[in-house]
Amino acid sequence: MKIFKRTASLFLAFCLCAGMLLLQPQSTVSAATTTTPTTKVLRIYSRSQSNSDIHINLPKGKVCYVKNIKTNSKNLIAKNTRYYTSTSTDEYTNPYAEIGLYAKKEGTYKVTYNICDKAGKKLSSGKVTVYAKNDSPVKSAKFANKEINSALTGKSSGKLSIRMNKGYKLKKITVATYDKSGKEVVKNFKNNSTLKLGQYAYISRNTYSDSSSYYTSLAARTTITVTYVDKYTKQEYQLVYIIRRLAK
């Protein structure tokens, strides 16, 4: 099951509208939704807008559009926000369309649509179940007994503890840091264990015939990716927490 990440430095409104980037309780997290090739079920947050909630694969080799988009409630707004269509049959050409959603209130909704050719003839149809729910997957995310936040920490290590709310299943945790050369190192992490924060920052260097560039940061970033199963869609999603300390 493919997972798309949308990261941010604050624990953004967790609205899988990546993910979804959905929650508002903490301060350094974002999320992203798992989608099948054509979305059939998804999780969003009410009163949170996104332009790319529903992803639809369009046929290759002909010009096609998404038409007749409907919802089963006036409390859910759905609109075709982008599309790419092509007559090419090249293997690298992937026509698609996206539908943005806005739920006025919490609820379980249905979205239906048709895929039509250039003349408006219906080729196929689709239906998506939308769970607009405002509860948070994570009950707490603590490092060294404090909720993770955006401030620089003076600690080099501490216990990392992720507690999920009822109905949400924690699948795995991965931790990404940078080595002395500025390259990313990713490792699996056991919940409720001691986390050693990264000491080094990301480094980017580029050299050209007439110029060169260098980029790094004052802060060494430790990125914690929490993969969990959503209690409504039963699909996998991710939350990304970031802890920063001064880099060597």
Image (cartoon, helix red, strand yellow):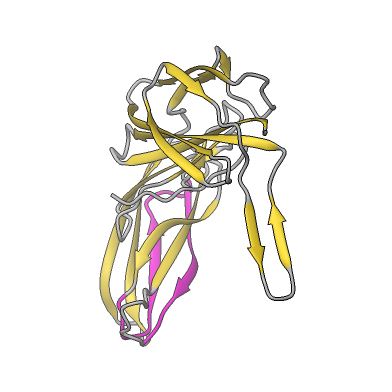
Residue 232 position within the rendered picture, expressed as x and y whole percent measured from the top left: 32, 35
Is residue 162 placed above or below 183 in the rendered structure? above
* Residue visible at 30% across and 77% down in the picture: 59
Camera-nearest residue between 119 and 24: 24
Q: Position of residue 30 (x, y in %)?
A: 53, 39
Q: Nearer the viewer, residue 36 or 193?
A: 193
Is residue 159 visible in the rendered structure shown here? yes
The residue sitting at 55% across, 12% down in the picture is 145
Picture residue at 42% right of the left edge, 28% below the top: 137
Residue 177 position within the rendered picture, expressed as x and y whole percent measured from the top left? 52, 37
Is 82 covered by the magenta stretch? yes
Point out the residue furthest to the top here. Answer: 145
Q: Is residue 173 left or right of residue 7?
A: left
209 left or right of 15 in image: right
Percent position (x, y) of residue 87? 36, 87
Question: Is residue 3 toward the left or the right of residue 27 in the image?
Answer: left
